[in-house]
Image (cartoon, rainbow, N blue to C red):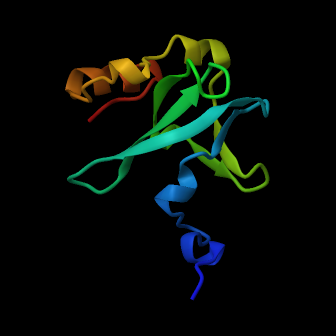
Amino acid sequence: MPETTDTYETHDLISSDRVEGTVVYNLQGERLGTISRFMVNKRTGKAQYAVLQFGGLLGLGSDYYPLPWQILTYDPTQGGYVVNINPEQLENAPHYSDADTPTYDNDYNWRVYSHYGLTYA
């Protein structure tokens, strides 16, 4: 039987392959980028980060910005996630290139969370 969209998305749940590529907007409705991947805490099973692909041209030269999952809000009218950050705040956020993936250790997690005014626990 062919798989349908309904198989991968309900009112409260969405399949990981549907999250990747989802557009992220700021509060003004401006497109910031797309979700490249998300990082799940192995112990809790909760999504910890959405990694935003931002900048570059057609994906070339893009950088990756880990966003704490709790700052994203899904907006069904836009078909994407909304965050209360502006492009300048994003440009100054911890980020990395394809060739420089960070170690998501406690120090890095603290830097990311504190940049967005959150406490990393």
Question: As displayed, is residue 88 above or below residue 16?
Answer: above
Residue shown at 55% from the left, 52% from the top: 19
What is the tally of numbered marks visible in this picture? Answer: 0
Instruction: Spot the residue most to the bottom.
Output: 1
Question: As displayed, is residue 39 above or below residue 19?
Answer: above
- In the visual, does 37 lie left or right of 2? left
- In the visual, does 23 lie left or right of 103? right
| Front one among 27 and 91 | 91
Q: Position of residue 78 (x, y in %)?
A: 77, 49
Q: Position of residue 55 (x, y in %)?
A: 62, 20
Residue shown at 37% from the left, 19% from the top: 99
Q: Position of residue 29 (x, y in %)?
A: 79, 34
Question: As displayed, is residue 55 above or below residue 30?
Answer: above
Residue shown at 72% from the left, 52% from the top: 79
Residue shown at 34% from the left, 18% from the top: 100
Q: Position of residue 54 (x, y in %)?
A: 59, 25
Rendered image quadrant of residue 95: top left
Rendered image quadrant of residue 101: top left
- In the visual, does 78 lie left or right of 72? right
- In the visual, does 50 lie left or right of 108? right
Which image quarter is the N terminus in? bottom right
Which image quarter is the C terminus in? top left
